[in-house]
Image (cartoon, coloured by chain):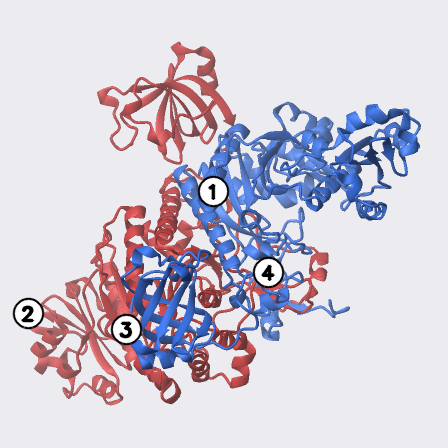
Chain colours: A blue, B red
Amino acid sequence: MKRTTYCGLVDESYIGKDVVLKGWVQKYRNLGNLIFIDLRDREGLVQLVFNQESGEENFQLAKTLRNEFVIEVQGKVVARDEAMINKRMKTGKIEVEVNQLTILNKAKTTPFEIKDDVDAADELRLQYRYIDLRRPEMQKGLLIRNKITQAVHSYLAENDFIDIETPYLTKSTPEGARDYLVPSRVYPGHFYALPQSPQLFKQLLMGAGYDRYYQIARCFRDEDLRGDRQPEFTQIDLETSFMDQEEIIEMTEGLLKRVMKVAVNYDLTTPIPRMTWDEAMSRYGSDKPDVRFGMELKDMADAVKGIGFKVFDMALENGGQVKAIAVPGGADKYSRKQIDAKQEYIKRFGAKGLAWVKVTEEGFAGPIAKFLTNDVEAIKAAAEANVGDLILFVADKDSVVADSLGYLRCEFAKELDMIDKSQFAFVWVVDWPMFEYSEDFGRYIAAHHPFTMPNEEDVELLATDPHACHAQSYDIVLNGYELGGGSIRIHESEVQEAMFKALGFTEESAKAQFGWFIEALDYGFPPHGGLALGLDRFAMLLAGKENIREVIAFPKNSKATEPLTKAPSEVAPAQLAELHIDLAETEEKAD
Amino acid sequence: MKRTTYCGLVDESYIGKDVVLKGWVQKYRNLGNLIFIDLRDREGLVQLVFNQESGEENFQLAKTLRNEFVIEVQGKVVARDEAMINKRMKTGKIEVEVNQLTILNKAKTTPFEIKDDVDAADELRLQYRYIDLRRPEMQKGLLIRNKITQAVHSYLAENDFIDIETPYLTKSTPEGARDYLVPSRVYPGHFYALPQSPQLFKQLLMGAGYDRYYQIARCFRDEDLRGDRQPEFTQIDLETSFMDQEEIIEMTEGLLKRVMKVAVNYDLTTPIPRMTWDEAMSRYGSDKPDVRFGMELKDMADAVKGIGFKVFDMALENGGQVKAIAVPGGADKYSRKQIDAKQEYIKRFGAKGLAWVKVTEEGFAGPIAKFLTNDVEAIKAAAEANVGDLILFVADKDSVVADSLGYLRCEFAKELDMIDKSQFAFVWVVDWPMFEYSEDFGRYIAAHHPFTMPNEEDVELLATDPHACHAQSYDIVLNGYELGGGSIRIHESEVQEAMFKALGFTEESAKAQFGWFIEALDYGFPPHGGLALGLDRFAMLLAGKENIREVIAFPKNSKATEPLTKAPSEVAPAQLAELHIDLAETEEKAD
C-alpha cells in the first residue's frame, strides 16, 4: 500500500481520514487491552493505538513489536481526548487507530537508544552510524545541510552560474597541505593526488570563458585531525569573470541571505559589516572575530608607558604592544589559580606571561597592582573597565598579543555566558596581507594562496617589497569561524611570475610546477575572482553543533578511520602489484 | 564598469541604448577606416564597429587587437543596414558602435582556432583544454550538462529527496571492478579505496530513516578506457524507502520528463515503454536496445529446421538458436567482401560464421542460397524480408546469436542512415536475471550487484536454483545506451546471506567482507530500492556527442592521463615515505 504521508506530518487536518503510515517503532506501551506505539519517520512521531476489541489478530501481532521494528499500518486518524493532548509533539492532538498492521522488518535490540541525549561513546556511535543517524538531532543537522545546498543550487542557477565538475584525480603540488595520493596502474611510479581545492581548474574555466562557475566540491587534505577538520570536506566553490571584489561580495551576500532564509528561516541583514584585517587583529586579536560580544582588545601603550613596569616597557621598546581586555564582572568570578591556568594555556602562543588586576572600589588588586597605583583612572579608561572587572594584559610582539588576548576574549566570553547563541553574526574581513611568515616553512607563504591578486596600488611592491603587499582578498566570518574566503586572482602571467618569485620560487621551480598555468595566462585570461564557503562548517553553525562530524553522514574519526566499514583496510598483494608499489618495511605501527 | 549583458544576448531590444560588453576577440577585420570585431562570450557573438572618425585613440588601440584578446567596450547598439543583416547570428540584426575600448588582457596566437570544426589532434585539445573549452560546441555540451543537474536538483527537492554526501575515502571490496587505492599515512599498510558507487552508503541511509536520498556522486573505476569510460564518472544516484519497483519507475519518469524539458526542451511522453530482459534480448539481441529503428531479430528455427543445412541443424540440436535480420535494401549495397568483414568482426562474440542471402526477384542469391531454394517464401516470411533485402543469419548458442545480430543490427542501421537522430527513444528493460555467467571470473556473478532483490516468487529459488532467479531490477535505456539502472534491494539479513552464498561466498568470506552490512540489516532496515543514472552519458546523448569526453570539462585521455596538468606525476620520495610505501622494482615501463 502507498504511504499517505509521513508520520510526523499527520495533524488535525487528517482527523476522520484513513491513512497508511510506515516507519519505526520508537516506543511501545502495553496497557492490557490497549497497545500504544510511537511510530517514527524522518519527519517525526505519531501515536498509534491498537485496540484488542477491534481485531484480535492485529492485536496479537502488535504484541510482538519491539523498538526499531519497521512496520506498515493502516488506520483512522482520531482526535485525542483533551486530557491526552501532548503539546510537545507536532502530532500531539491526534492518534491513529490501527486497523491493519504489517511487520516489514524486525530489529534486534540496538546498541544504544535512539534519542537525542544519547550516552554512547563516539566510537560506538560511528560504528553503528546507521543507528546514530536515526536520532532526530542528527537528522535535523543533515536536513539543514540539505537545505543549504538546495538554496545554493537555486540561487546560483538564478544568477547564471554554471555547475561544472572538476577532476578528483589530479596532480600533486608541493604547495599547501599534504596530499592524498593515488597510485597509477598505467604509469608505474606515478601518482594522482586528490585535490585540496578546485582552485586552478576553476581559474582555467574562467580562461575558457564560462564566466560564472560553481561547484559543491569535495576537497581532501591529509592533515592531523581536529574538531572541525576531516580528511575530506566540502566546499561551495565559485568563480566569476569580470567582477571586482565589491561585486563578488555583493553577490555572495545575496547567496548568504538566501541560504539563511531557506535553511534556518533567518532574515540576514545586508550589507554585512566589514572590517579590514588590521582592524580585526587590533580589536579582536583574530582574523575571524566573533562579533557577537564586546570585550575588545584595548591598546594600553599610552596609559602604561613609562609607569615603571618593566614587562610593559620592554615590550613597547622592542616595537611590540601592551594590550588588555576587561572581563566584565570577572573580579569576583576568577581566582588567582584559575587565572594562572589561563596564563599556562597562552604560552602556546608564545606569551611569556599574563598580567592582571581586579578593579575594586579602592583601585586595583592583584600581583601587579602595586606598579599601577598612580595610573588607575587612566588605565581603567584605556581598558574601558569598571569596578568588578578583571583586566588582563599581554605585552609582547603584535602576533603574540593578538593570539593570546584573542583566545582569552573568547574563552572568558564562553565561560561567562556572554554569547547570544541565537545570533548569526557575519562579518567580512578584507584587505589581507599578501604574505604571512610561516614558522613551519621558515619563510613567507601566501596568506591565501599563490594566485591571489595584490591591491592595484601594491602590484609594483611585489617586486620591490613583497611582504608589504596587501591583497584583494576577503574572508567571510560567522560567529568567530572562518566560513569562507576568496580573492581576485592574478590574470596576467607577469604578475603571476612575480608572485612565485616573491614566494621564493626560482624561475625553474616555478616553471616545473606551474609552468602550464603561467602559460595559460598568456592565452587571453579575463580578470576573475571567486570565493569558497565551507559547507560542513556552515551546516555545523546553522545546526548549532560544535563538531562538523555531526553534520556529515559518514565522517572519519580522529584517526581518519571509518569504524563502520573499517576503512582504511589491508588490501590484496595482487592489488598492490598492479599499482607497482610495495609496502615499506614498517618502522613502528601507529597506535 | 559593470557589464550590461552578455555579448550573445544583445538583440534589437537594445537598439539605441548604451551598453558595456566584455569578451574575447573572435574575428578581426580592418577595412581601413572601419574595424569590425566579433566579440565572443559564453552566450555568443556580437559585432563591434570601430569608426576612425569617432575617436582616433580608440581606433589606434583597436588596431592592436588580435584574436583572443580580452576586452571591455562601451558603445551604442544600432540596427544594421538591411543588406548587412546576418541571419545566422542571434545578434545579426544589430551591431555596437564602440566609443571606448579597454584591453583587459592580451593573448598569444592560440595553438588552434576557436571554431567548431577544429582540426587539432585530441591530445593537443586536451593539453590546451582551456582553449578547446572556448569552442561553442564544447560550451553547449557543458551548458546542457548543467541544465540536467539543475533539473535534477529542483525535481528531487520538490519530491522530498535529501541531498546527502557519502564518503570518497572508503573501503576496498574485491567484488566489482578494480579500485583506485589511497594509502593511509596513519595506518601503515592500510588503504582507502575511491568508491565505485555509493551503493552501500545509500542503503545505510535508508536504514537510518532518511527515506529519500539523492546525490550527484563521483564514482571511480580503474579500468581500461573506452570511448564512454573515464577513470572518474558521475552518477545521479538515488534511493527510496517503502517504494516498490512500480513507484520508483514512475518517479524516475517524472525526473526524466523534467530533465528532457529543461535541458533540451523535449517533451518526453510517459509512461516510457517497457520490455522484459528476455524480450529485449530476443527482439534486439541487446539488453540496451536502440528502438529508434526496426530490423529486429527474427527466430528462423521453424522456417529452417530440417531443410538440410548442417550449420543451422547443429545449432538447433545443441539447444541454440537460428536467428536473422533483414537489412532493408541491403542486397545492392553490400558486396561479399563487405559482408565478410562483418563476419570477421563478430568472431569476437564467439560467432563461428555469418550466413547470408540476398533476396532477389528470383529467390535467394549468395553462398548458402542453394540450401534454401525449397523454402524461400517461408524464410522470407519468417525474416520479414522483401526483395532487395540482405538476410543475415547467425546460428549458435543464444548469447552468441544475440551479441552478433545485436551488433550487426546497429552497425547496418548506422551505415544505412536508418536512425532518426532527432529522436530520444527511452525504454525500460525489466525483469533481469539475477546472475550472469562471467567468463572472466569463471563463475556466476550478480547481473547488477549482490544487493539486488529477487522477484518475490523467486526468493525461495535463491537457495535451490539461484541461477534461475529473476530480479526486481530495471534499466533505463536511451538510444541504445544504458542510461542507468536500479533495483529493489535486499533488506533482510537472511536473504542477503543466501545471496552471498549463491555468489560462491563461504560464510566466512561473506562475513569478512560484508559482515558489518549483514549485521546492519538486523537492526530494522526498511524495504528500499533506488536507481542511478550516468550523468556523463546522459549529457553526451542530449548534446548529440559520441564520447563522454566532450561533456567533461577536464577528462583523462585513453591512457588515464590529464595532459594539461600532467597527472599522474612522479612525487617526492618523502611523500611516499610518509605513506609507508615504496615503488616496486619496475618490470617494464607502460608505453
- In the rendered image, residue B276, in percent from the top left (x then y), is placed at 25, 72
Q: Chain of mark 3?
A: B
Residue identifier under label 1: A259
Residue on which disc 4 sits = A182
Up-down relation of residue A361 to residue B377 (above or below): above
State which mark lies toward you, 2 or 3: 3
Q: Amino acid at mark 2?
A: Glu
Q: Which chain letter goes with mark 4?
A: A
- Residue under the image location 61 percent in, 41 percent down: A420
- Asked whether the viewer can see residue A208, the reply is no
Q: Nearer the viewer, residue A201 or B332?
A: A201
Viewer-proximal residue, A399 or B343?
A399
Q: Which residue is mark 3?
A: B277
Q: Write down the residue under mark 2.
A: B361
Left or right placement of residue B92 versus residue B31 in this view: left
Which quadrant is the C terminus of chain A positioned in? bottom right
Chain-order first, disc 4 or disc 1: 4
- Label 1 to label 3, Cα distance in Å? 45 Å
- Marks 4/3 in contact by CB < 8 Å: the verdict is no
